[in-house]
Image (cartoon, rainbow, N blue to C red):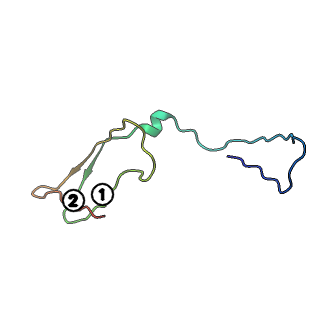
Amino acid sequence: LIRIHRENPVRRPTIFNISYTSIGVHISHAERCGCSNATVFLKANEPLPFTSPDWPVHYCDILMCVTTYVAPTHHHVEVKVST
């Protein structure tokens, strides 16, 4: 967005040219909207933050990512949700 503001009213149309160069990295839709399904091997009695990947960035439509959490033998996964 480019906004032009003048302190004094203009009595006739003003003509001007604006040029710009876009810089940055182009990320294709496939790269941006893809995800790698992952497996996380948990360690006994070591808490691990459980977060949404890339939050708060907007997710692409119809995106489904799967992360599998594996507890050590004779252990279970406990999830605590706080607001």
Percent coordinates x, y for residue 34 in the rendering: 41, 37
SS of the residue at dot 2? loop
Characterize the local packing of mark 1: few (<14), some (14-19) or many (20 or more) Cα atoms within 10 angstroms.
few
Percent coordinates x, y for residue 47 in the rendering: 25, 64
Could you tell me the amino acid type at mark 1?
A: Phe
Characterize the local packing of mark 2: few (<14), some (14-19) or many (20 or more) Cα atoms within 10 angstroms.
few
* Snapshot quadrant of residue 21: top right
Task: Pick whichever, 6 or 76, lies toward us.
Answer: 6
x 20%, y 66%: residue: 45
Percent coordinates x, y for residue 55 in the rendering: 41, 53
| Disc 1 target residue | 50
SS of the residue at dot 1? loop
x 31%, y 61%: residue: 49
Q: CA distance from mark 1 to mark 2?
A: 8 Å
Could you tell me the amino acid type at mark 2?
A: Val
x 83%, y 57%: residue: 7
| Disc 2 target residue | 79
